[in-house]
Image: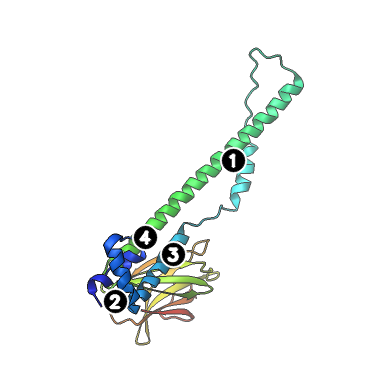
Amino acid sequence: MSPELHALAGAYALDAIDGDERAAFEDHLAGCPDCAVEVRSLQAAAAELSHISEASPPAELRSGVLTAITRVRPLPPIADNVIALRRARTSRSVWQVMAAACALIALVAAGWGYQQHRDASNSRNTAISAVDQVLRAADGMSTSGEVGGGHATLVYSKSQKRVVLIGHAIPAPGQDKTYQLWMITGGKYVSAGTFRPDSNGNVNVSASGDLSTSSAMGISVEPAGGSPQPTDVIASMKI
């Protein structure tokens, strides 16, 4: 196996090479099962990142807008060079209220949408930065698996002693519960921290620790605050 070509697996999975390098790597990929597995794993990790930006409007947005509409003061009718009729004035007031309400809805929705976009962008950029730093390591790798009906990908580097967990559609662990990440070495478990998915089931967790002798990473459901040792392991991924 060519070390130079093998090192291109991460860049190829992220579509970051072209020309002669791409052609050379694809020729190498056709005969290298190790690189093929690595590329598939890294592409799965990149796909998980795309889910981080998904967001649904909060349930209280509609009721908040409708409540705000009742506080909108309609604009006075324009009287210059106009013969005002009661029916026309009433109709105009109604349309002014409706126009103001529509403007308010658009303003609130746009403001909420911008905030969600900014938060999602910040979250996505943070996740990409963390994953990119790990993948830049010579031994940067990834592995994927099911977690509680959802899907998770671990991107890790034993030399950097870093791991990033990216999850999608991970269910909430339950009231007064939390997920806990573990480094598994020879049957011994060392905690790598606790986490909870967001309201959309997305997870983006970075952890550090001595992975040099670890053979797997585990995920368990624990009481809030975590446990010194796992009590309910629901997933294990070899590393």
Q: Residue at x 33, y 81 (%)?
A: 214
Residue carrying label 4: 128
Query: Which of the two discs, 2 and 4, labels the residue nearer the N terminus?
Result: 4
Query: Which of the two discs, 4 and 3, labels the residue nearer the N terminus?
Result: 3
Residue 180 shown left or right of residue 129 in the figure: right
Residue lying at the far right in this picture: please name it: 87
Decide which of 214, 145 is in the foreground and name it: 145
Question: Could you tell me which secondary element the residue under label 3 belongs to?
Answer: helix
Query: Which of the two discs, 1 and 3, labels the residue nearer the N terminus?
Result: 3
The image position of residue 44, as x and y in percent, is 42, 68
Question: Could you tell me which secondary element the residue under label 1 belongs to?
Answer: helix
Question: Could you tell me which secondary element the residue under label 4 belongs to?
Answer: helix
How far apart marks 1 and 2 lie (CA) works out to 52 Å
Residue carrying label 3: 47
Q: Work out which quarter of the rendered image holds the N terminus and state it.
A: bottom left
Residue carrying label 2: 210
Front disc: 4 or 1: 4
